[in-house]
Image (cartoon, rainbow, N blue to C red):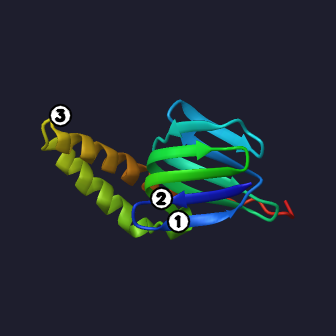
Amino acid sequence: MHFKMLTPEKLVVERDVQNIVIPGSEGYIGFLEGHIPFVTPLKTGMVEIVNEKNTAYYAVSGGYCEVSSQEIIILAEKATNISQIKKEETGEILKKVQQLLQQTPVDSDQFQILAREAEWAELCSELAHKTIIPKSEHS
């Protein structure tokens, strides 16, 4: 099955996969080849992509996932391979965003934007400090 993940800035990843698990609006959902057509909004979370040789993990925030019988496309607001998350930066960013949230009126548009940024920063911080052992064909 073919898979693509894009953000407004770039094509994040494109590859053939055996299965994929995404953070859908109602929780994590897994897809295999031949799945019925399906569209779901994405929550901030981790995408797990499995092929014959390995498993890759990506952090994603916002957007949509569209599934057809032969292809899965994720259009995300933000996405990055977890190996590219820098531990030393995540804590600082999270602290700054949380400070800004405390100073922003809850009913403002800016608060909603900052809340999404805080979710993203929390996810990246969590993933940067977690050891995920990739599955391989030898495990």
The amino acid on which the numbered mark 2 sits, given as a three-letter code, is Ala
- Determine the CA span between mark 1 and mark 3: 33 Å
Is residue 17 rendered to the left or right of residue 101?
right
Q: Nearer the viewer, mark 2 or mark 3?
A: 2
According to the image, label 2 marks what residue? 79
In the displayed structure, 4 sits above or below 99; it is: below
The amino acid on which the numbered mark 3 sits, given as a three-letter code, is Val
Quadrant of the rendered image containing residue 109: top left
According to the image, label 3 marks what residue? 106
- Determine the CA span between mark 2 and mark 3: 26 Å
Circle 2/circle 1 CB separation < 8 Å: yes
Comparing 113 with 90, the one in front is 113
Comparing 60 with 133, the one in front is 60
Which quadrant holds the N terminus?
bottom right
In the rendering, which numbered label is found on residue 109? none
Q: Nearer the viewer, mark 2 or mark 1?
A: 1
The amino acid on which the numbered mark 1 sits, given as a three-letter code, is Val
According to the image, label 1 marks what residue? 12
Instruction: Give the secondary structure at mark 1.
Output: strand
